[in-house]
Image (tube, rainbow, N blue to C red):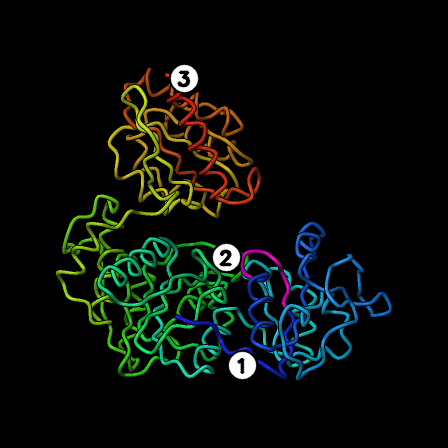
Amino acid sequence: MSTFPPDLFRGRRFAVLGLGKNGLPAAHALAAMGAEVVAWDDNEKARAASTPSFPSAPPSWPGAKGLGATGQGDGPAKPGHGGGEDSITLRDPTADPGFRFDALVLSPGIPHRLPNPHPAAVRAREAGVPILSDTELLYRAVRGAGSKARFAGITGTNGKSTTTALLAHILVEAGVTAAAGANLGPAALSLPLLPQDAVYVLEMSSYMLERIDTLRFDAAAMLNLSADHLDRHGDMAGYASAKRAIFARQTAGDLAVIGVDDAGSQAMADWLDTRPARVARVSGQDRPLAQGPALPGAHNAQNAAAATVMARFFGVSDDAIAAGLRSFPGLPHRQQRIVTVDGITFVNDSKATNADAAERALVCYDRLIWIAGGMAKEGGIEPLVPLFPRIARAILIGRDAPQFAATLTREGVPFDMVGTLDAAVPAAFAAAKDADAPIVLLSPACASWDQFTGYDQRGDRFAEIARSLAGGA
């Protein structure tokens, strides 16, 4: 592993919008490769947090904010400069005359079409500037640096994080040089330059897949498809189209892995049969080469099957794959067992931000106390009704708790509306004791943004409270 050449993008000019976990590393990486970068975030706090490393545009420039960033402070570096930190300017790119950029790099959460395109995206389309994800630029950088490192891409409504981490774990344990990131873990442009026989393992969200142009995955997987992010993609057809982009540009020597446990994925499998890549179908009914303790349930059997097929494609033996399945430690916030107190186990499945993901956790337990709620997705928890007999009591939190309460009332499931997670965890503990339920499961079936910065903060808080109960006991 090594760094990218400092002149790789010399003479190129990029606008980076959104200075979070994707945009900030992208801005620094592009500058380190010689590009001129105009970086911006609409959130003032995010801009202020970035100013220690970004020079500000002079106040005379349109859109300059003069946030007092360190650096030369004499405006953007000119194309052809040597790159580095001083080639980054904190400035709103929409104020740039003519929007003269080689690409607009939008953080995944910023829309470029639906529901309302960001003004920078509108400017980019008017100026004929491509809108790209950092994963696309990683691919261009790797190829531009002369490396033929292979790319594995994994998507799906659910399971993509686990499968990405699992495949990377199997490869590394088998002695294959690999780096994992993108939607999971490190941002794509934070990853190092890998040698010829190495593998980039990238988790690809639908938001990222909308913004790739030349990226070709040697091995690509689409695990499952259920309603999610429809505001961003318009409808299920638009969502499926975004997911299908993971197979774009594949050739006869490539591998396309497709789940077949839902109708949408089955339709995509039929489409893949008309394409040049070799198609491998995987299912939750597949028997794994080894049973990993961090991979419970049929959904993880599908994840393991996808990782197995892809690892074989990259030359890993079945014995090494089985060893990797057994030693995989799992991921935080995905059926993560936190602590057992008085015989009651607290399970953090905060990553379950929709009903389909929550279903995958609920089926693993015969009797439980369920903590749910937040910002509900379309359809709420209606798909979970067949699993309600497993729920001894539900504890509801967040904005859409009343919507969930209506469904639970209709189905005769007892519940408490407590509002916050801080109130929910001790209430669930008490309910578990009263109902003789051995599991308290946080699997919210909702996004977390009404009360938290993300599912990870929600899961961390759940774990913190659960461990405090252990201390009290």
The residue at which mark 2 appears reads as: 230
Q: In this rendering, is residue 351 above or below 211?
A: above
- For marks 1 and 2, give the one nearer the viewer: 1
| 67 sits left or right of 285 in the view | right
Callout 3: 10 Å neighbours few (<14), some, many (20+)?
few
Q: Name the residue under label 1.
A: 8
Q: Identify which residue is drawn at 30% across, 80% down.
A: 275
Residue shown at 64% from the left, 61% from the top: 116
Q: What residue type is labelled 3?
A: Gly
Q: Which residue is at a point 20% across and 71% down the rendered structure image? A: 315
Q: Where is residue 445 in the image (x, y as percent from the top left)?
A: 43, 41
Q: Which amino acid does label 2 sit on?
A: Leu
User: Circle 3 sits on which residue?
Assistant: 472
For the residue labelled by badge 2, is the local secondary structure a helix, a strand or a loop? helix
Q: Distance between the residues labelled 2 and 3?
A: 44 Å
Give the residues in magenta.
16-22
Give the x, y percent position of residue 44. Answer: 72, 52
